[in-house]
Amino acid sequence: MGSVDERRASKWRLGHVLDFYAKTGPDSTALIVGGGRRRITYAELLELVVDHCAALKCRGLRPGDVVVLQASNSIDFVVALLGAARAGVVVAPLDPTLPLAERGVRANRIGARAILTDTKQPNERASFPDCPEWRLKTAELNGKPVVELVAAEPASVIAAPAPGLSDHDALLMFTSGSTGTPKLLPWTHTNLAAAIAGIAGAYHLSDWDATVAAMPLFHGHGLVATLLATLATGGAVLLPARGRFSAHTFWDDMLEVSATWYTAVPTIHQILLDRAAADFPADYRGRLRFIRSCSAPLPPATVQRMESTFGAPVLAAYGMTETTHQASTVLPCADRRTRLHTVGTPTGLSVRIVRTDGSTAPPEAIGEIWLSGPTVVCGYLGDASATASTFIDGWVRTGDLGAVDRHGNLTVQGRIKALINRGGEKISPEHVEEVLMTHSGVAQAAVFGVPDALYGERVAALVVPENGFHLDPADLISACRQSLAPFEIPEWIELTDQLPLTPKGSVDRSKLAEALTEVAR
C-alpha cells in the first residue's frame, strides 16, 4: 500500500477525507486556486467544508437527500462536494456544459432537492420547478476565502430520491451504456475508499506529491485519481484558473505547484506533446515521478515520445465507472514492454477473462474482461435488467476484450460495446441518434465513431431524410446543440438514401464508416 494505511483507508468517508491531514498537517497546501493562485491549506479547506455542510443543513437538507453539483474545476466544486457529503447528502456531479434542459431531466430523475452550480443559469425553470438552484460563489471575508450560497432559498418541497439508494451511497454517477438513456451508478463510501487506496497505493502517493487537475472533476478520472487520491494522502492539487485544462498555462501551473505527476486522457497528452518544443520547460525534464494515462487507449508510439520528451515513465491505467474508476494500472517499477503494451495489473481487484461459452480463458487467450472486488458497484439504480446482464455473482462484465499474460498484466484488445470514445468521453450512439430523430425531416439516423489521431475517435452520422424533405446537415448540427453535450455533437453528418443493413434488417454498424466514405465522395 505504500504510504497509505489500509486500516485508515477503510474508514475514509467522502466528507471526512480531509480530516487526517487537517489535524496532522494543518498548514500544508491542499489546493492552489484562481488566477491569483491562492494557496488553501488543509485547515482552511476543512473549515470551508464544515461551514458549507452547516449551510446545507440550515437550508433543509437531510442525510439521504440528493443534490446535483454542476460546476467547473474550482474551489466551489471541491467545497460543495465535500460539504454535502459531510452532511450525509448524496451528490450527483454533472458536466458544466450539459444543456439546461438535460440537467433538469437528470435532476428530476434522481429526485434532487437542490442544484449547486457556480454559473448563473437563464431563468428557465419549467422542467424542474421544485428543485431550487443554489449558486456557489467564492468571496473573501477578513482575508479568508468563503464559499457562499447565493439566493439559496430553503428546499421546502421534499423530492423523492431515486428508489434504491442506501445509507452507504456517497455519489450518483451517470454513465452511457448500450442504450440511449444514461444509466445511474451509486458509488458507496466503501467503493470510494477502496478506489482511493488502490490508486494511492499503486503510485505510492504521499504528502510530498502534487499535481494539476487536467481532467474535469465531474468524471471519475479527475475526481478519484486527481482530487480525492491526492487529498487523502496529504498532497496538493492546483485547479487551473479557467476551471479546465489549458495547454497555454499547463506547465506554468505544474511549476507553481511543484507537480510530481499528472494524469490525463491521451488527447491531452498528444496536445502537450505537440506543444512541447515551445512550452515544456527544459529544466523540468526528469522532475516528474510518472505520468498517468487513462480513459482511452494510449498508442505505444505516443508512450515512447512522451517518455523521451518529458523524462518520466508513462503508466497506462484501465477502468470504468462500474469499478469506481481505476481497475488496473502499470506500476512505476514496470519494465518497458509492460509500459508500452499493457494496462498493468489489477489494483485491489480480481480479473477473469471469459470465453463466449462462459469458461475462463487461460493466460494469453482473449475473451471478455470480468472484474470483481471492493470498487465494483452493486448495479445500476432503477435498471434491474441492465444490472442482471452486467453484474453476475459479484463480477462486472466490462464489455471489453482482453487477455492476461503470464506475468499477470492485462491487455485490452478492443470494445465489444458500441460506445464511441472521443478523447476519453464515452458517447452512446443510440442517444445521439434519438436526438437526431427528433428532427421532423429525419427518417433514419446512424451514429458511429471514426478514427482520429488526436481524439482517438470523432462522432459522425449518416442520416436518411424523409421523402421530399430538404435537410441541411449544418442545421442538424445546430439543433443537436440544444440537447447534447458539446463532445456528443456529430462533427460530420452526411445524407444518404439508405443505411447499410444486416440480413435481419438492422443497421450494420461494421459498415457505417465505409458507407460514410462512399457518400462523401
Image (tube, rainbow, N blue to C red):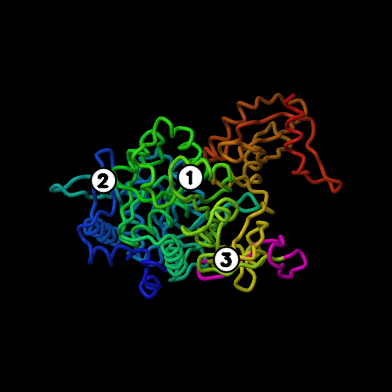
Q: Which mark is residue 379?
A: 3
The residue wearing badge 1 is: 307
Q: Amino acid at mark 2?
A: Thr
Cα gap from disc 1 to disc 2, whole angstroms:
39 Å
Q: Position of residue 435 (x, y in %)?
A: 62, 40
Q: Residues within 10 Å of mark 2 (few under 14, many from 20)?
A: some
Q: Does the magenta run of residues contain 18?
A: no
Q: Is residue 438 above or below residue 231?
A: above
Residue 454 shows up from this direction: yes
Q: Is residue 442 above or below residue 291?
A: above
Per the image, label 2 sits on a secondary structure element best described as: strand
Q: Which mark is residue 138?
A: 2
Cα gap from disc 1 to disc 3, whole angstroms:
38 Å
Q: Which residues are magenta?
A: 355-375
Q: Which mark is residue 107?
A: none
Taking depth in this image into account, of 378 and 284 the one nearest to the observer is 284
